[in-house]
Image (cartoon, rainbow, N blue to C red):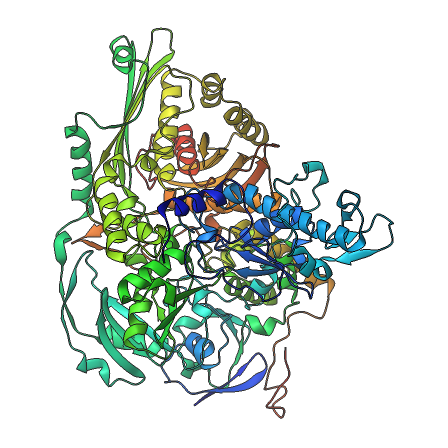
Amino acid sequence: MKISRRKFLVGSGVIGGGLLLGFSFQDKVPVPHTRTGSFQPNAWLQITPQGEVIFQLDKAEMGQGVMTSLSAIIGEELDFDPANMVIEFAGAHRAFTNPQMGVQITGGSTSVMTGWEPLRDAGATARAMLLAAAAQQWNVPAAQCRTDNGFVLHPDGKQRSSYGELAQRASQQKHPGKVALKSPEQYRWLGKSLKRFDSEAKLQGKTTFGVDVLLPGMKVAVVVRCPHFGGSVLSFDKQSVASLAGVRAVFAIHSGIAIVADGYWQARKAANQLPVQWNKGPLAGLDSASIGSAQKAALEKTEKPFSILNEGDVDTAFAKASQTVTAAYTVPFFHHSPMEPQNCTAQFRSGQLELWAPTQTAMIARAVAAFYTGIEQENITVNSTFLGGGFGRRGYVDFAGEAAAIAQQYPDVPVKLMWSREDDMQHDYYRPPAYHSLRAAVDAAGGVTGWHHNFVSNSVLSGFGVDLMHAMLPTWVPMHIARGIGRSVADHVPPYDVSMGEGTKIPYAVPNRKVGMVHHDCGVPTGFWRSVSHSFNAFAVESFADEVAHAVKKDPVAFRREYLKDQPRHLAALNLAVEKSAWAVQPRIAGFGRGVAVHESFGSVVAMVVDVVATDNQFSVKRIVIAVDCGFVINPDQVIAQMEGGAIYGLTAALKNGVTITDGACAQSNFHDLPVLRMPEAPALEVYIVPSMEKPGGIGEVGVPPVAPAVANALFAATGKRLRDLPLVL
Amino acid sequence: MINFFLNGKAVSVDVETDTPLLWALREGLQKTGTKFGCGQGLCGACTVLVNGNPTRSCVLPVSSIVGQNVTTIEGLGGDHAVQKAWLAMDVSQCGYCQPGQMMSAVGLLSHNSNPSEEEIRTAMSGNICRCGTYPRIIKAIQQAAKNLQKEQGVGVAFYDPAVDAHTANGGAV
């Protein structure tokens, strides 16, 4: 396909800067799920003459509620009850590029943030064209017609036409240009706690997650992978399992040995019995202790870390300081463990590859499938399913590459690749470990004059850049060139990957501040983990802020208020959490402690007040009071749900052991040795929302970062002991 | 061929005898509401009721349930008090663990019609939710308990072939 680079860039920009009508999409791939004869003003929306309003949900529904929130946004401006829409997973298409990420992907808490303007524009534009169609039909001025939930009303107050009746005529109307949007007081569905549209099916076991895809003649595959990261197969004894009941095929693929069987249990039994000799690869002998000391050494020997922030004169501040506070913090590798283990179904026949993939990025899944099979992306269809949790793990699509490779070698029938929980935990893209070194300068008057923060971690880009670039570039770019550019990015950019320093630019009014980053990659796969670098940076920064507050003998809340005077959003969230928790009224219970943390991420600010009770070397988290400012709230109850969920997800990583590495492999395997928070340990949660009419911020991840430091700060209040390493152990 | 009663109906499934009930349900009988989570009885996603008791189907050989009564999420019928409460509280996020959560909750309420919060937390400790819906599950179970008490005498009914042995086809729960 001939297409100019300029057109590609323009096309990408159009989606970000406000939707333009018409189909100037760049790939040969048609817009998915187009109905003949429908009014389709843009890639998201169709109205059929039968009156169906069909919304292509271009984001993955992984529990965060996009099916409900995004359809409410477009429905509001279309003036059509989102509960009555037909909502379909869009599959992969360039039209749905995430403007913050350059590729179609659900992540970074961006769905509402980036959908807010284009989806309202899309709905309002469609509504304007329906109004124009009705006006033309009735021969009255469009300005005198109104809409009411799926109908255009005639100025006479008697006649009306449904959107379906107007669909054909609407598709002949001219694009109206810039259209006016509703003002918030006109909202019927936005700002209301609509019940989730996916609840009912989920409660009846009727939802199709990836694992639930059932197709005629389907086989099930498992893959036996080298437990050592970067290792490979030396040899395997195919004959020893080939004749086991139900086993259909045993063959090597890029990531290990695939076993195809009639059912999961047969495949799994064969996998457990398969003799394999492994080449342990480049990480043989590597363990967590050596990774930790290598990180620390990397930080200490780097004279000039990559500068994330450098304001004022930090050196002079420390030279003049009458008191210096120092501390170091560490976090371990941590697993994602969504409840649905990774899986993907694939079918290869007549040169066409079809995937059914529970992924956060159908578009990268398509690119990765192309890479491992050599099949052109134009000949690959990706069907999205519901996701049994994502948390960043399903932004990586290794399972799609495996399923595609298996289907190519076992063609014609659909094959469902199933990972075990052990596979999922041992072949994750973990939250990277990090080591943080902080110091603060305090002057004679007790004022904090300097803040110096250096940290070491590795970039999550290394595991992502190649596939991202392959998917991001138009499909006419030859694959080896696209991936070569990606390799180059993944190899050269990580030391400067500012996304690893998120949340280190402290909001506190300290005049001299310096933050430096050192890149150290031990080779263990790492990746986006709900809130990414915020999750560990906030632990260091907000724990240290607490240490500084105590060092200058100030109440942690009073200290934060003093240094957040110029940060109204932080202050509002902090004050709300403080007020609702009755911060100053602390119960007289033995071992009681209360801690606070406030953190901005993904365009939102969250404050938490945590109550703990500690006895001897045990403690429990009793209550978390959460205040969030996420701008205008689409669905208050779902904001509350995400804050509850984020707090509990973060609490698992604060309290439970992470992954350790032994001999270049994950040393744990299932929920017995990688425990997660269970119901008896779940604290009471209270969520309060700061009223705001600002544009929406993110919500899916923002509940995670403040948890760990708030718990650590509470434990200090309870015991006088400062815990600086995750997991928090007294 | 393994014969048992699924949601009140006699079923036969042709799988090897050591196959866990989970796979007999999901693949053999194409009832996919019961989920695979860990394969080791650690997470509760695969919870079903065997003769009314919450049981981890991923570690239960199908041979051990011959002639027994198995109730899965599909057998709750959609308007069970527990499902109604889950809907009212909008408990689900990703929803993957919820069938198992609800089966554990049904089992709890069939033995304890008015559980305390502490009893709920203990009874539900075998069911993991990574989305963090625990606070809403607690509220939903309390709500379901109230609803069930209002529906006095209705309770949670399970098909029992010992009572109704002559109708092998059974009736839906």
Residue A237 drawn above or below residue A32? below
**In this rendering, would A358 be left or right of A229?**
right
Marks counted in the figure total 0
Is residue A110 among the parts visible in the rendering?
no
Quadrant in the picture for the N terminus of chain B:
bottom left
Question: Of A72 and A715, which appears nearest the observer?
Answer: A72
What residue is drawn where x is 52% and y is 37%? Answer: A697
What residue is drawn where x is 33% and y is 33%? Answer: A501
Quadrant in the picture for the C terminus of chain B:
bottom right
Q: Quadrant of residue A121?
A: top right
Residue A572 drawn above or below residue A269? above
Question: Of B7 and B148, which appears nearest the observer?
Answer: B7
Is residue A94 among the parts visible in the rendering?
yes
- Percent position of residue A637, x then y: 61, 46
**In this rendering, would A7 be left or right of A196?**
left
Residue A577 drawn above or below residue A290? above
- Percent position of residue A488, x then y: 22, 45
Residue A551 drawn above or below residue A541? above
Question: Of A358 and A408, which appears nearest the observer?
Answer: A408
- Percent position of residue A592, x then y: 46, 33
- Percent position of residue A640, x then y: 57, 43
Q: Quadrant of residue A440?
A: top left
Q: Quadrant of residue A262?
A: bottom left
